[in-house]
Amino acid sequence: MKTQLLPLIALLLILFSCKDVEEPSPNSRIEGKYVSTVEIEMTGGKLDLVNTLNLKSDGTFYAENYTTEAGKDEILGYRSYFNGTYTIVDEKVTLEWKESYTMNFFDIYYMPKADLTLSDGNEFIADYAIEEDYTQLSFMCPPNAFCTSQEVYLKTN
């Protein structure tokens, strides 16, 4: 009789000792730094226009857009930086800028970060599709907008 109870007891121990494994929250899965780079050619050489998004698990983000010489890491100057909050719904992350500093000039590709101007009262919202298991974010062009290219951010960490 004892030998017949041992498999039953072992089965009960296995069933009750297993804990449910919780799926990580979308905010913890998306947390990290994402980078998008576009190379442009000018008469003096090539530049990389680098855009970064740093998403935190608390629903906030910080972003910087800066310029480097093509293939180099040294930052020549900045085009903008901003922060805000984000929400995730149905494989889409929506960024809402709260504070944004930008260049007021359109014929240059960078300037010192301290010279960027606070954009007062202009809130901006953008949607990105979450792809490849949270390793890639792709800009979603709004309806009735003319978008010439789709910006893609790749997760770096």
Image: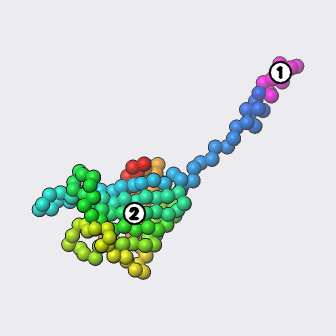
- Mark number, residue 134: none
Residue drawn at the location 46% of the way across and 63% of the way down: 61
Q: Nearer the viewer, residue 64 or 76?
A: 76
Residue 139 quadrant: bottom left
> Seen from this angle, which residue lies furthest right?
1
| Residue matched to label 2 | 63
- The percent position of residue 8, horizontal first and vertical second, equals 80, 27
Residue 129 quadrant: bottom left
Q: Residues within 10 Å of mark 1 (few under 14, many from 20)?
A: few
At numbered mark 2, what does the secondary structure look like: helix, strand or loop? strand
Residue 122 shown left or right of residue 89 in the figure:
left
Residue 147 belongs to magenta span:
no
Magenta stretch, overall SS: helix
Residue 129 shown left or right of residue 39 in the figure:
right
Residue drawn at the location 17% of the way across and 59% of the way down: 41
Counting the numbered discs, the total is: 2
- The percent position of residue 144, horizontal first and vertical second, equals 36, 73
Closer to the chain start, of discs 1 and 2, is: 1
- Whether residue 94 is visible, yes or no, is no
Q: Nearer the viewer, residue 99 or 87?
A: 99
Residue 82 quadrant: bottom left
| Residue matched to label 1 | 4
Q: Which quarter of the image is occupied by the N terminus? A: top right
Residue 10 shown left or right of residue 68 in the figure:
right
Give the extent of the magenta segment.
Answer: 1-9
Q: Nearer the viewer, mark 1 or mark 2?
A: 2
Distance Cα–Cα, label 1 vs label 2? 64 Å
The kind of residue on which mark 2 rests is: Ala
- The percent position of residue 130, horizontal first and vertical second, equals 45, 56
At numbered mark 1, what does the secondary structure look like: helix, strand or loop? helix
